[in-house]
Each structure stands twice: as structure tokens, then as C-alpha cells.
Amino acid sequence: EPEVTQTPSHQVTQMGQEVILRCVPISNHLYFYWYRQILGQKVEFLVSFYNNEISEKSEIFDDQFSVERPDGSNFTLKIRSTKLEDSAMYFCASTLDNEQFFGPGTRLTVL
Amino acid sequence: GENVEQHPSTLSVQEGDSAVIKCTYSDSASNYFPWYKQELGKRPQLIIDIRSNVGEKKDQRIAVTLNKTAKHFSLHITETQPEDSAVYFCAALIINNAGNMLTFGGGTRLMVKP
């Protein structure tokens, strides 16, 4: 069964550094998402992406964040200048209609 | 925007007993309600979902009920087993909304004691 994949599984970075989190959605899916989960808390929506543009974004997704689909398979989340409070698990998800399939997540630790 | 409340935050049951988790939502336009199971350090996995044109859906030991008028939906797990222990999240979504974003509840940590 096809799955969403994410790399790296764990990223450690210094505050102020840029990070890029990578996702490969399921190949025939059309909608792509990034969610964040701070340790022990609920999953929070960051951004949705459809037809090569952002369709919706939350208040969390400020100017420090950007997304890109650089080719036909990858979907990336960039954080320009990381802050301590960006430490969280970041999940990518994709869907063809309504059921969203989640990737295994990238744990981002900002020191 | 949508707000989803989930209760209880923790639930401990004896193996074989039933577990019920409840959620309420605020946006009457929401029309798709999935439930996710998340084991420690793992991704959320969809276990069951329901659309607003249906009042109840069942899949083996798991069932979900929806009351559109009250904006309330519940997850029922019967004959619980230790492997049901996990964090369960409810969510709400508006189908055909441009972003199709999921709004999650706060989660319920279910512990099934053998």
C-alpha cells in the first residue's frame, strides 16, 4: 500500500538556522498538507497546497514558513530562521478526496 | 474558524470493557469527521470516519455516531484490548472547502488495563 514518506526522521538545528523538511506524498494525490504537533499536544494545521499554490494557511504559518513542490514528487516545508518554539513533530499529509494520509513525521529540535 | 473540543483527556478501562470518547465542533458547515489513533512516536492513523449525511457507522469493534443538530460526535470501542491503548484524536473538516484543513480535538489518552 502506498504511503507518505518524510525525511529526515529527526532534525536538530541551532536557533536562527534554516531548515527544510521533505515529504513525498502518495503519487496520485492532489492535496498536500503540513501539520505540527508539539510534544504532548494536539495536531495543528499549518498549510494546505493544491494546484501548485497555497490554498489555506493558519496563523502559525507566518513569514518564516514557506512551502514548495519543486518537482512532481517532493513537497517541502522551509523554516527560514528557526525559533526554540518551532521544536515539534512536523507531519506531511496528502489526499485525493477527503481521507488524509499522514507521513511518519520529522521531529525538529531547535537548540 | 472551526473549534473541536474532545473529552475526556484520559480514559482508563479494563480489558473487555467499552470506551467512549466525545467531541463537539463549532462550525455547522463541517461535514466530514475522521478519528485518528496515534501510538507513541508514530503517525496518526485513520481508524474510522463519518460524513454528515450519516448518523452512525460501524467497523467491527469501532463505531462512530454523529448528531448534527447538537454538533456532537462520539467514538465507541467495544471489547477493548491492550493494543487499543493509544491517543485518539477526533477531527472535523469541510469537504470542498478550498483548503480542506483538518481541525483536531485535543486528544484522549486511552489506557486498556489487562
Image: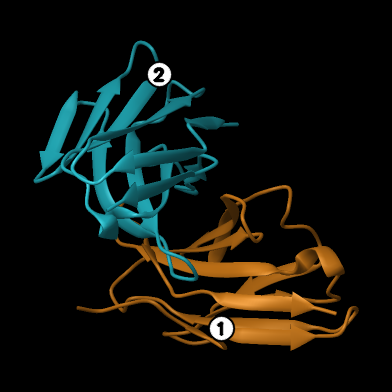
Amino acid type, residue under disc 2 in the picture: Lys
Do the residues marked 1 and 2 share a common chain?
A: no
- Element type where label 1 sits in the image: strand
Q: CA distance from mark 1 to mark 2?
A: 36 Å
Q: Chain of mark 1?
A: A
Q: Which chain is orange?
A: A
* Residue B79, quarter of the rendered image: top left
Which x, y percent locates residue A87?
A: 74, 69
Q: Which chain is cyan?
A: B
Q: Residue at x 17, y 39 (%)?
A: B78
Which x, y percent locates residue B23?
A: 43, 29
Q: Is residue A79 left or right of residue A30?
A: right
Dot 2 surroundings within 10 Å: few (below 14), some, or many (20 or more)? some
Identify which residue, B92 or B85, lies in the foreground. Answer: B85
Which x, y percent locates residue B111?
A: 39, 49
Q: Chain of mark 2?
A: B
Q: Is residue A34 left or right of residue B87?
A: right
Which x, y percent locates residue A19?
A: 74, 83
Asked if A41 appears above or below B54 in the picture, the reply is below
Q: Which quadrant would the N terminus of chain B be assigned to in this image?
A: top right
Q: Residue at x 74, y 67 (%)?
A: A65
Identify which residue, A12 or A62, lies in the foreground. Answer: A12
Question: Looking at the image, is mark 1 or mark 2 nearer the viewer?
Answer: 2
The reply to whether residue B92 is in sight is no
Amino acid type, residue under disc 1 in the picture: Arg
Asked if A54 appears above or below A107 in the picture, the reply is above
Dot 1 surroundings within 10 Å: few (below 14), some, or many (20 or more)? many
* Residue A72, quarter of the rendered image: bottom left
Label of residue A22 in the image: 1
Label 2 sits on residue: B71
- Element type where label 2 sits in the image: loop
